[in-house]
Each structure stands twice: as C-alpha cells, then as structure tokens.
Image (cartoon, coloured by chain):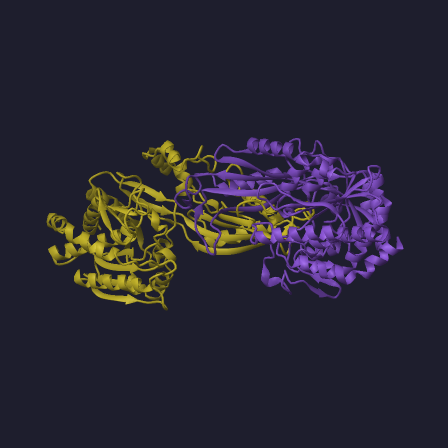
Chain colours: A yellow, B purple
Amino acid sequence: MDRVIQKLRDNHDRYLEEMIELLRIPSISPGKPHPEALEQAADWLEARLRRAGIEDVEKLRVGDRSPVVCGRKHVSDDLPSVLFYGHYDVMPPDPLEQWQSPPFEPELRDGELYGRGTADDKGQLLMHLNAVEAYLEIKGTLPVNAIFVFEGEEEEGSGALDELLDTHKDRFAADVAIICDSPFFDRDCPSVCYGLRGIAAAEVRVQGPNSDLHSGNFGGAVANPAEFLARLINDLKGRDGRIGIDGFYDDVLELTEAEREAYAALPFDEDSFRNDLDVPALYGEDGFTTLERIWARPTLEVNGIGGGFQDAGSKTIIPSSAFAKLTMRLVPNQDPLKILDLFEEQVNSMAPPEVVVTVEKGHIGYPFIAPIDNLHVEAGKRAMEKGFGSEAYFIRDGASIPIVTSIQKKLGATCLLLGIDVPDGKIHAPNEKLVIDNFHKGMEMIAYLLEEL
Amino acid sequence: MDRVIQKLRDNHDRYLEEMIELLRIPSISPGKPHPEALEQAADWLEARLRRAGIEDVEKLRVGDRSPVVCGRKHVSDDLPSVLFYGHYDVMPPDPLEQWQSPPFEPELRDGELYGRGTADDKGQLLMHLNAVEAYLEIKGTLPVNAIFVFEGEEEEGSGALDELLDTHKDRFAADVAIICDSPFFDRDCPSVCYGLRGIAAAEVRVQGPNSDLHSGNFGGAVANPAEFLARLINDLKGRDGRIGIDGFYDDVLELTEAEREAYAALPFDEDSFRNDLDVPALYGEDGFTTLERIWARPTLEVNGIGGGFQDAGSKTIIPSSAFAKLTMRLVPNQDPLKILDLFEEQVNSMAPPEVVVTVEKGHIGYPFIAPIDNLHVEAGKRAMEKGFGSEAYFIRDGASIPIVTSIQKKLGATCLLLGIDVPDGKIHAPNEKLVIDNFHKGMEMIAYLLEEL
C-alpha cells in the first residue's frame, strides 16, 4: 500500500497538469452556451479512463443530452462493487468581472487552484480516477470491482443519468457508491456526509384585476395582489419558524439524541457564522440549533417575489398580479411529491375569495440519509482519517443532490459522500477554488478506501 | 347670452382645427423626450391667448423647467376674479403599438377625438379659452376678471407652478379657480367634483444577509427578507381593510349622512364595475361602500414589490434583500407629512430584530375638499346643468391633483373641478379620447359660468 501512496505522490505534477487541461474546457451545462465543450470534456474523460486501464469505456446517451461517460474494471464476482460518481459539467461563471483570474484559465495561488469546476466537480472527480489508476499500476488488480460514472448535467438536475439508472441497471449495479461533491465541515475537519435535504419547488401567483389600476381611482375598493400574496406568505410560516402547512411535519424523521449531541460537539462558531452573513441576529425554527435547522429540519423559503412597479421612483398603481417563487427543503422521510400536494391544498384552502390564486408545482428532489453504523460508512470514515491524518466527523448537508437519492434507491447502493471541498470553496460563485493539499490527500483517501472496503 | 352660445356653435370647426394643431405637438413632460415640444406648446398658447384678446400674456419660468403660460383680462376691482387652470403637458404615449391611430396625429371617429392629450388636458384647457374669447367678442367685456394659468409639468407634480403661486401671489390672486381636468361620474352624468384624496409615498426595504444565500446551505437558519417583508405588509393592514398604523385615522374627516345618502343615490353599477376589473369579488374597508372607499376613505396600497429571483425557472436562494413601494391615499383632513411620520414610526416599531428595515419617505400631496354649500360651488353646478342640459351631481374623486390643494391654500380661492372627461376616456393610456359633444357643451358651461359667478 505504501507504494500506491508513493506513486500518487510522485505524480502530483502530472495530476495537476491533467486537471488544468480538463478545467480549460468550458463545459457549462445550465443554458449550454458551449455545447461542444460538454462533448469535448466527455471525450477527454473517455480517453483518460482508457489510459488508466479501465475497461468497457463508453458514452451513454439519452436523447440529445450530454453523454454519461462510463467505464468499469471487473475483478471478481466475489468482491464488492464500488461506483465512483462525478460530474464534468460546471456552473456558468457569471459575474465574470468578479473573478481574480479568468474562470477557465486555472491559476494556482498559495496552494489553491482557482477556476470554474476546480472543486465542483472536476477536481474531486479526478481523485477517483487517479487513485484507482495508481492502485492498478502498482498491484495489477483491484480489491473491488470499480464502476465509473461521470455525468454532464448535474447542474441541471441529472435527468439523463437518472433515466440510465433505470434502463442500464446492470451496467451500474454496485454495493457502494462514492460521491465526492460536498465540503468539509470546516477547513480542517474532514467529514463524512450521511444526510442531504430534499427539495420541492412551487410558484404561487395571485391574480387581481385584469390590468394595473390607478391607485387613486381604484385604491381601497379592490384587493391588491401584492398585499394578498404577502398575507399568504405570512400565513405559510409562523413567527416561530414552524411551517403552517397541514401534515407538513408528519413524516419528518426526528433527530436522535446522539445526533443532537454530536452536532453540539462540532467546532461550530455561531458568532462568526452570523458575522459572515452580516445579519443582526440568526433566525429559525424554535427549539433547534443552527446546525440542526440547516441539516435536519425542513424549510420553506421565498426565493423570489415580484409584482407591480419595481423601477426607480414611484408609480401609483395597484398591480394586476404578484408572484412568489418558493422552495421547501425536505428531510428524511418527507416525500416531495406528497409535500407539493399538501402545499397546494394549503394554499388553495387559504386563497381569499377576492383574488385568483394559482400554484404551479416545480422540481423535486428526495432527501437522503445513510445509516452511520453501516460497515461501508464506517470504512469511508476510516479511509478519510487515514488519508487526512486527523479525525473525521459525521455531518449532514442542508443542500440537495437528487442523484444521490436515485443511486441509493435505484441501485440499492450505500452512498458515501466523501467530498474534500472547503466551506469557502466558492462553488457556483466567482473565484471557485480547490485546496490542492486536500486534492492530494483525497486521492490517498480513495486508495485507502479501496482496501478498507 | 344667446349670441355668445351661438358664436361658440358657429366656430366648432375652427375650435377643432386649433385643438388638433396643439395636439400634434408631442409635449410630453415625464422624461422630457422632446423638450422643444414643451416650449412649442407654450408658444402656441401664448399666441392663442393674445389672439383671444387676453392681456399681460407671458411665460413665467422657474429654473429650466417648462414655462407657465399666463394671461389676464382685468375688468374691474369690484368684480370677482376667476382663475382658469389647465396644463399643456401630456403623458408618454407608450405602449405605442396599442394605439389605433398615432397618438400625436389626432383622429376623429364616431364623434370622439383620439390622441394623447385630447382629454388630459389640452382639450379641456381650450374650453376656457374659447368660451372667454367668444364672450369677449360678443359683449366687449367680461362679467368677471379672468386669469389664465397653463402649466407644463402637471404630469410631473406641478413643481414650478407651485413655486410661482408663492412668488407671484398677486399675479394669480383669485376668488374662484376653475379646473377642468377630471371625469364625469358616468358618461351621461355631468359632475362637480368637490373632493380629492391626498397622497403619501414611501418605500420599505428589508435587508438580510450581505449577499443572496444558497437556500440549501443556509435555509432555515437565517431570516428571509422577502418573508419578513411579507409579514410587515400583512401587519400594516388588517383583513378587514383597516390600516394598522397608530394614529392613522385620527384626523380623518368622516362622511356626513347627507354625503352617504347622496353617493348611495348615484347610478353606480357595482356589478359592472367588478366585471370590468375581472375580479371575483370587490374588497375594501369594512363598513363602507365602494364609492365611499374610493372617494372618502384613506388607503395603503403596495404599488410594487420585489426581491430575489424573478426570472423564469427556479433559483434556490435566500434573497439578500426585498422592498415594497407603497402609497397611501389620504382624505381630508389628514396631513401627508404627519402620516409619513406615523408610517415610519409604525414600521420601525414592527421591525424584527433579525433584519434591518429602512423606510424612505417619498412624495406627498394634500387632500382637497370644497364646501358644497358654497355660493361659487353652487354657481358651478348651475352652469354645468345649463351647459349640459341635465342634472349635475356632486362627486369626489379618489385620485390626487396636488396643484388643486396648492391653489386653494396659497390663493384662498374656491376650487371648482368641472371636468368633462368620460370614465372611459383612457387618460394616461393608449387611445385617449375626448367626446367632442362634451367639449362643445363644456365651452357653453364655461360661458354660463361667467354669468353665474
């Protein structure tokens, strides 16, 4: 094993050069401004997998969507199968002017590589590949069956891969799935993420008069859609942070005492969290801590609200309509489809007779939780501790990665989230970066994981 | 007097041609897209006043604002002085594609003249001028002292004229002011408007975190500015339509029983009002009828609301901030400056500790009411009935014309609002029109008024 680790260390320069090659390809998925770049990135990965000695490398396609690049190294039916997941698509780089160096011309500064996709997810994706390649080179075989799945539309909802998990179940069958697309709890706290929130989106529109009205000639005699929308939003959540939808909390998996104690023991600095946000006070559901609220409690948030006159100055109208875009973050065992139904019923039951209220249901994602006493999860924690040389924490994440739940449900695989991003990694934002030392240690973690599993 | 009326009738064609000349000048004041057109319209009126035999014609200026065109015909210190007010500026014609004929190329269709400014206010302004001219021509003198004041920024708040009313008090001193810039109660209901609402504008901003936040990574742990803004709006008005600002109703002049009876007797069709707006039900302050709510009760309306993501699709953020633009329509004897103070105090007292709430005060206008048992008001009603050959009603208007209050306050003049616009006259909108028969009868009304006063 020492030779595998040494091999990984000897190749640092090559790994960095290769990563920069892949990062230079602007494979943006939302809006697809450079569709050819997505194909180019997929081709690059296909060639790279072949070079690493991976077999059955191919690009699977669903319609005209970005291809899913697959490969595998089957060793023996008696060994566990491990699926290594990553995505080669990236978020748009806007606003460009806020980048210190161009998003697709990666630049190394103080041990951190800056560029779009460094952390999310090209850098983390390559950890898998490099570690498996090194292991294969040194030992000539693997202690597991490896399956690689690199998709190109994670930032757009993973629709193609989700479909392929159904149609190509055998191709992907795995006991464990390793997903490196999440952050450490804190810069120096390697973390195994065992829970994600789900999501359910909806838009509420309040329609009033058939056109904007003069607020002098009509004001006082007709319902104002912006005001009535405000009443709805007010009533959908109490001042105590409890969501006012009948049945909303019915299926919520409550935190265990052990989890609450574990979270309380984490080195979380609430003051600096608040200071970073620059808010006078934090706010959330009564009876829960900040970490509990983010990781294990469901939310209802207004993502956007609009109606009437929004430009500079004043325009004395009653708006014809107003809308709010909302998302609910869900926790195990809430079902987003059921929650959207409850939401719609609640809004309809609250709709006042003076306006027309409509609900448009949006995208959904299921919450995820892995049992932390599972053998594979324990193996992941040990590998992370060996790779990083310090204690690893069990954490959850408040965000949603729908494909994780799909992999868990459709393949029956235990999902391990072993991301090595840092909290200030600026994913989806200007100046996204990867801590190169974490990248190196992350490869060693994967190598150790092969043995541990 | 019959000869004056006959003279007015003989000149119909000339009046229409002259009006069309004036209407072709695109003297838009908001945004001043054609500043030279405002000067051109002022010059046109200056020449027209001189031709009508009016004396001391001149353009008064405040800074680089549109000139106020003035003139007078002083007959005797023993006669009452009557100020004829009008404005030659117009609203922008957008959206252009909704006009059936070009806004500045007036077109006569079915006895109605279509074009920007036909009703608001060039057509109504010329009624004064034509009537006084005809009277002068036939009788050689006037039964009153006449003062003409035509301003060029009514659609921008009448700032220049408001200032001139202070600096040139003697120039404008009048016992009665005639303002024709308001509609009939209904197509066949000539109306003397004796009350207007005032206005007080404000913008409320709720500031949360220093940037938009990922609703997965932060949702549930920090106050959402759009949600907290909604709570504020909800709390500022009860479901019963009562405004929740301490002291807001203290100075409200309550409706008299006579007024309530008079309004109830008006031919107001609530069903067709509701149908025109296409709302499932009307809404307003409990205990008042629709007309009472619009004419004699104060309001608080959201003119616009915004925050966060408003484009198509979904963006899962907690907005950094949210805002609402509000205006309150005020009734006699509310003081808009006092109301703005009360509003600010109320919002500040409601501001929750988790966000930063700021109030920015906006423009104001005072409410107006004339005593309906005043001799001049009665004379106006009689003149209107003679001109139109049918009973005239006393009505109020829910809108605000700040200059009316200024004229009343600064000159001590009784203001008569004798507008001949129709409710579907589309002022400020595409296809603005003037009913030509109303224009003709309106001139006769002014001629009778000279005698009645």
Q: Is residue A364 above or below residue B175?
A: below
Q: How many marks?
A: 0
State the residue at coordinates (37%, 54%): A405
State the residue at coordinates (64%, 36%): B244
Question: Whole-percent x and y of residue B204?
Answer: 54, 39
Question: Whole-percent x and y of residue B233?
Answer: 58, 40
**Residue B20: which quarter of the image?**
bottom right
Residue B133 shows in the view: yes
Relative to residue A328, is residue A371 drawn left or right? left
Relative to residue B221, is residue A131 drawn left or right? left
Q: Is residue A53 above or below residue B88?
A: below
Comparing B430 with B269, the one in front is B430
Question: Whole-percent x and y of residue A363?
Answer: 45, 56
Q: Is residue B169 above or below residue B16?
A: above
The quadrant in which the C terminus of chain B is found is top right
Relative to residue B199, is residue A24 drawn left or right? left
Comparing A418 with A67, the one in front is A67
State the residue at coordinates (40%, 46%): B216
Residue B148 shows in the view: no
Comparing A169 with B213, the one in front is B213
